[in-house]
Image: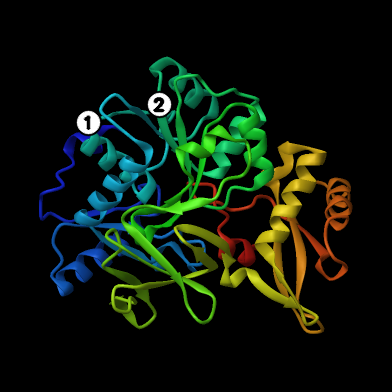
């Protein structure tokens, strides 16, 4: 996995297309052709193509690709290194795939700072025990994880090695309950906010936040700015901002640039106070049930709290979906791989934490909950199962 770092040439005008090698060959080739066509049409040089999470795509072949310049990755890495006070004495553990901005970004940060990168996958896959062994053996100082990986460390009861000084957590919201449990075990977590379109994080908790055990605020990094538009959505601009999108559609290959005067409108609601970014949640998570507004992401966080009280092992086996309702507009359904009896216990514990209109109105049992390589739920695939 350290191979990319050795071959990476940030000064080259060569374009890179980084796709998941485990995708079906037909879809892989479709996306390869998509990127090649788009970069040729737009005359792109020195760019890296990376897929978005694909959680809303109807198929792998319809996954949206993002073109990021190598200069964008350099700007991001320079800012992150500054924020983490990273130097050549640091040792990064690498457990994020290179075909995601988080994994590729680590390689660029290390290349610029002179730090060492230690791969910590087992047979190209995440293994919490193997990861922990690598951390201890190699005396690693920095890492980047997604909440699912943090959850696995907490479930195992592993305590942070003394050499580790910071872990950037991205790829999804880190719930306060999980943060508290991880910090109690000594893990130096820095929650962050970012996206593929900005070549990784643009806001991260400070190193000073580790002096406290309170859930930290996240601060905009030096290369990025943010504001809230009149509709309450976050808009961002950064030296690491993407160049364009590309996607296979029913009408054929499409590539476009949605930015307006260097500002990109995200799907997230939030506010900016000074350099502090306060993210309220994605627009699609805001629904109305019988005329009452609620945030599904918040309800999922409450579900996680309820499950942690019952059996932490269940967290990855249960989730909530907002489903259309002729009477109410939307309603909350429980999706689970567990038994009916366990689902009843979870629903009762969850109901005690929410308002009456937010309660679960139906439960669905599935064989599995589809997830991406980073543990994100593939919502469209999940809905298709139902």
**Camera-side residue of 67 and 229:** 229
Q: Where 55 falls versus 312 (above or below)?
A: below
Answer left or right for 23 relative to 270: left
Among numbered discs 1 and 2, the one appearing first in the sequence: 1
Residue 143: mark = none
Pinpoint residue 74: horizontal percent, then vertical percent.
Answer: 23, 49
Say which residue appears at 31% left-offset and 70% top-offset. 246
- Residue at disc 2, secondary structure: loop
Residue under the point 76% across and 67% down: 332
Hey, which residue is sitting farthest top in the picture? 137
Position of residue 233 relative to residue 50, above or below, is below
Contact, CB < 8 Å: mark 1 with mark 2? no
Image quadrant in which the N terminus is located: top left
Q: How many marks?
A: 2
**In this orientation, does residue 371 appear?**
yes
Q: Viewed as shown, does residue 78 lie left or right of 143?
A: left
The residue identified by callout 1 is 114
């Amino acid at each position: 996995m350290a191979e990319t770092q050795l071959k990476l040439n940030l000064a080259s005008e060569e374009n890179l297309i980084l796709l998941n090698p485990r995708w079906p060959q037909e879809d892989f080739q479709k996306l390869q052709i998509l990127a090649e066509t788009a970069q040729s049409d737009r005359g792109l040089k020195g760019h890296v193509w990376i897929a978005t999470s694909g959680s809303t795509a109807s198929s792998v072949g319809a996954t949206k690709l993002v073109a990021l310049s190598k200069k964008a990755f350099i700007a991001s890495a320079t800012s992150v290194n500054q924020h983490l006070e990273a130097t050549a004495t640091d040792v990064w553990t690498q457990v994020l795939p290179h075909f995601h901005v988080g994994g590729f970004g680590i390689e660029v940060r290390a290349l610029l700072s002179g730090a060492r990168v230690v791969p910590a996958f087992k047979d190209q896959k995440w293994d919490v025990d193997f990861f922990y062994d690598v951390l201890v053996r190699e005396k690693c100082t920095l890492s980047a994880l997604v909440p699912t990986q943090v959850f696995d460390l907490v479930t195992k009861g592993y305590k942070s090695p003394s050499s580790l000084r910071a872990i950037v957590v991205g790829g999804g919201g880190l719930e306060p309950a999980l943060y508290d449990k991880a910090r109690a075990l000594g893990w130096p977590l820095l929650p962050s906010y970012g996206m593929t379109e900005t070549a990784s994080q643009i806001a991260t908790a400070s190193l000073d936040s580790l002096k406290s055990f309170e859930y930290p605020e996240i601060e905009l990094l030096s290369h990025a700015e943010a504001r809230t538009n009149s509709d309450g959505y976050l808009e961002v601009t950064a030296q690491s901002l993407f160049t364009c999108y590309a996607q296979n559609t029913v009408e054929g290959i499409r590539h476009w640039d949605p930015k307006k005067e260097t500002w990109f409108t995200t799907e997230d609601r939030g506010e900016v106070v000074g350099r502090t970014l306060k993210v309220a949640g994605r627009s699609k998570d805001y629904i109305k049930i019988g005329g009452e507004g609620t945030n599904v992401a918040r309800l999922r966080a409450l579900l996680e709290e309820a499950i942690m009280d019952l059996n932490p092992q269940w967290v990855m086996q249960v989730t909530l979906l907002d489903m259309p309702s002729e009477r109410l507009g939307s309603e909350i359904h429980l999706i689970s791989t567990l038994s009916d009896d366990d689902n009843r216990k979870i629903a009762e514990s969850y109901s005690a934490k929410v308002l009456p209109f937010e309660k679960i109105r139906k439960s669905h049992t599935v064989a599995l909950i589809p997830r991406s390589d980073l543990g994100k739920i593939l919502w469209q695939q999940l809905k298709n199962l139902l």
